[in-house]
């Protein structure tokens, strides 16, 4: 299936590893020019080198999304350097975790990273996407919609991202911009959260595995496949939806 992406431009934040990197990999393989960022210079340099091997233009930046002024400035500069922007994925997260002795753990990071990284990112790129009739995809989690393990900030801030994305889709539709959300379930990759849980909390790892109807953890590539489809012109009349990618891990009816 031709997704119609060759020659288009995208920015993916937090894109040197994990789901963000797989999204960038797939976009580059489809002929998309990229702006990528992370906080580690060496990782950004390596990602730029790897992605450029696809014959596309790749602009890398060392950016702390929680430095909001610098973040918005980088987004605008990168979109201009690419010659315009068609797609945007704000992928940076403050992360998960819960400390029963410190219930405030992760809330500030989640607000600044997940929520404001999404809101301010969308604000910065909207003028460019309005010109191209482009698209955004926000990354949430299935834990935003049901109980998972503990009352983590991560789950709640991602619920805010889902609500914001749904409302933003209505607001931006008249400008021809599509906004969708992808909510992954438990995704395993080397060095990722579930790799660490497998090593440090094997009972939890096995309990969650047993809850997944398909009998395995998902891969970041499987999430990237859905994200890139939603970004593409092939999904031109899809906006305001929250797509679950979880191997039937969640049990609620998804109307």
Image (cartoon, rainbow, N blue to C red):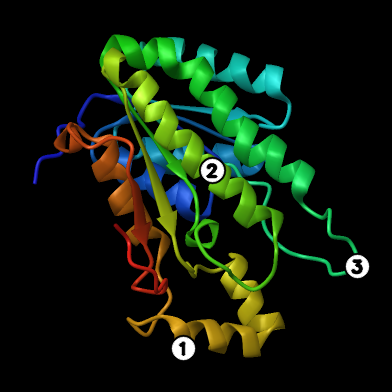
Mark 1: secondary structure: helix
Residue 65: image location, x then y, percent: 66, 31
Q: Residues within 10 Å of mark 2 (few under 14, many from 20)?
A: few
Residue 240 numbered tag: none
Q: Which residue is mark 2?
A: 46
Mark closer to the observer (1, 3): 3
- Image quadrant assignment for residue 205: bottom right
Q: Is residue 7 above or below residue 231?
A: above
Mark 3: secondary structure: loop
Q: Is residue 47 above or below residue 210?
A: above
Along the polypeptide, which appears first: circle 2 or circle 3?
Answer: 2
Whole-number angstrom distance, CA of label 1 to CA of label 3: 29 Å
Along the polypeptide, which appears first: circle 1 or circle 3?
Answer: 3
Residue 101 numbered tag: 3
Residue 211: image location, x then y, percent: 46, 84
Q: Residue, x 54% and y 25% (percent of image)? A: 121
Mark closer to the observer (2, 1): 1
Q: Residues within 10 Å of mark 3 (few under 14, many from 20)?
A: few
Residue 95: image location, x then y, percent: 67, 53
The answer to whether residue 87 is visible is no
Residue 210 numbered tag: 1
Q: Residues within 10 Å of mark 1 (few under 14, many from 20)?
A: some
Marks 1/3 in contact by CB < 8 Å: the verdict is no
- Image quadrant assignment for residue 238: top left
Q: Residue, x 50% and y 59% (percent of image)? A: 145
Mark closer to the observer (2, 3): 3
Q: Residue, x 28% and y 15% (percent of image)? A: 174
Whole-number angstrom distance, CA of label 2 to CA of label 1: 36 Å
Nearer to me, 163 or 132: 163
Marks 2/1 in contact by CB < 8 Å: the verdict is no
Q: Is residue 200 left or right of residue 28?
A: right
């Amino acid at each position: 299936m031709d997704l119609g992406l060759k020659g288009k431009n995208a920015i993916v934040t937090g894109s040197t590893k994990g789901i963000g990197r797989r999204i960038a990999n797939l976009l580059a393989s489809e002929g998309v020019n990229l702006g990528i960022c992370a906080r580690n210079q060496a990782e950004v340099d390596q990602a730029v080198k790897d992605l450029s091997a696809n014959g596309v233009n790749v602009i890398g930046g060392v950016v702390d999304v929680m430095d909001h002024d610098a973040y918005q400035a980088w987004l605008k500069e990168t979109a201009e350097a690419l010659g315009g922007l068609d797609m945007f994925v704000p992928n940076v997260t403050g992360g998960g975790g819960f400390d029963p002795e410190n219930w405030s753990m992760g809330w500030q990071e989640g607000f600044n990273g997940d929520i404001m990284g999404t809101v301010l990112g969308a604000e910065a790129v909207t003028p460019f996407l309005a010109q191209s009739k482009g698209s955004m995809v926000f990354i949430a989690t299935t834990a935003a919609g049901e109980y998972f393990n503990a009352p983590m900030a991560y789950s709640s801030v991602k619920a805010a991202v889902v609500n914001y994305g749904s409302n933003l889709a209505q607001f931006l539709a008249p400008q021809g911009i599509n906004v969708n959300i992808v909510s992954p379930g438990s995704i395993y990759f080397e060095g990722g959260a579930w790799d660490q849980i497998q090593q440090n909390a094997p009972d939890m790892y096995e309990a969650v595995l047993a809850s997944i109807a398909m009998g395995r953890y998902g891969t970041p590539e499987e999430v990237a496949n859905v994200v890139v489809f939603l970004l593409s012109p092939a999904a031109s009349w899809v906006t305001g939806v929250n797509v679950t990618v979880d191997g039937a891990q969640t049990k609620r009816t998804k109307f």
